[in-house]
Image (spheres, rainbow, N blue to C red):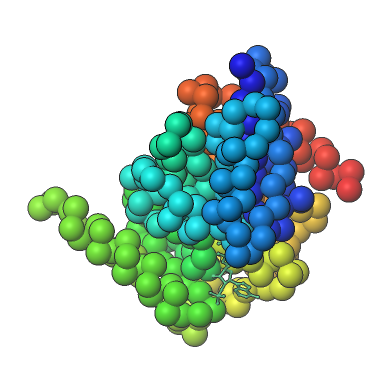
Amino acid sequence: MPYRYAIIGNPVSHSKSPAIHREFAREMGLSISYEHLLSPLDGFNQTVAAFRSAGRLPAAGANVTVPFKINAFNYATELTARALRGGAVNTLKFDGANILGDNTDGVGLYADIERNLAFKIAGARVLVMGAGGAVRGVLGNLWDASPALLAITNRTFIKAEDIAKQFNDAKSSSAGAGDSKEKIRVMALKELPAQQFDLIINATSASLAESLPLVPVASFAPGALAYDMMYGKGQTPFLMLASSAGARTADGLGMLVEQAAESFYVWHGLRPSTMPVLAMLRAQLAKI
Ligand code: NDP
């Protein structure tokens, strides 16, 4: 029997998740329904409850995007370890009264950087800019990949401090005797010019407003990769700055497809091919 899925957000109509999941389902020979679902900012729980109870087909899951990832974390009745680590959920799986909350953003980012872009995070100096829901989802996977340095910075400094503390505290309580990994470092914007990075990830929503997070050109090491989680037709201001500093650039379209593939696996236990869907979306973006 076909099942229903949705991407819940505000705004949400721009989301490519329905197209991605329909393509995955087509490849796998599954029949699914996947829709955009706009939720009022103060009505996330009611929106999910209405989605679950309405419709001819049973609702089996939902993806969750800005600004509801923490609402989804609180809504779930069971959480995976990777969702618990960051305190944010982008994938809900409904099973009777049970609501599983998971987070596939970190796996998606890791797969795109390491596999699709062939960049090795192990031993690299990595800077993450931002301290919102997306950062909560990806920090653990970046840390597990053993960078030489993992730093986080944010316009509102205290939010970066809070996230780093949460991850570092969890790390300390689970560390074995031989675990000598340095903690996630919080850096103020004014400290950045003194440090070079091999990978700089823009996980702020500055690019949505076509503005630039404050990153100095001096922070890009020779041969650095600049990664903007945002995606669109042209380069974001962050990627333009990175290009001018000689860095290699990548947008977040690959992450989007890879995190969707991981959600698909959570729901269906099947791993679809991501490259054809990424190529399809890239071609569509070029036509806009
Ligand atoms: P949140 O709203 O939770 O967080 C936004 C972050 O951006 C905050 O740290 C905020 O700083 C910062 N910020 C916003 N405007 C500016 C600005 N003008 N200059 C500097 N910093 C700014 O968003 P998310 O974390 O959920 O998402 C962040 C981005 O990542 C979005 O663009 C989203 O589309 C993208 N994303 C992409 C994914 C993909 O698959 N490609 C997956 C998930 C997210 P402050 O704390 O100071 O307000």
Find residue 30 and report its horizontal and vertical position in percent: 64, 18
Give the left or right position of residue 107, taking residue 59 as reference: left
Residue 176, position as x, y percentages in the image: 14, 50
Q: Residue at x 59, y 38 (%)?
A: 53
Q: In the image, is 1 to the left or to the right of 38?
A: left
**Front-most of residues 174 and 191:** 174
- Give the residue at x 81% y 52%: 233
**Nearer-the-camera pick, 82 or 216:** 82
Q: Is residue 113 visible?
A: no
**Residue 215, x across and y down, in percent:** 58, 74
Residue 153, placed above or below residue 283: below
Q: Check the picture and name the quadrant holding the N terminus.
A: top right
Residue at the limit of the structure toward the left, as seen here: 177
Query: Residue, x 48% and y 59% (percent of image)?
Result: 70
Q: Position of residue 80 (x, y in %)?
A: 36, 42
Q: Quadrant of residue 95?
A: top left
| Towards the viewer: 129 or 20 | 20
Farthest residue, direction bottom: 190
State whether residue 229 is above or below residue 160. above
Residue 50 placement: quadrant: top right
Relative side of 58 to 149, left or right = right
Residue under the image location 68 percent in, 33 percent down: 55
Front-most of residues 192 and 15:
15
Quarter of image, ligand 1: bottom right
* Residue 50 appearing in the image: yes
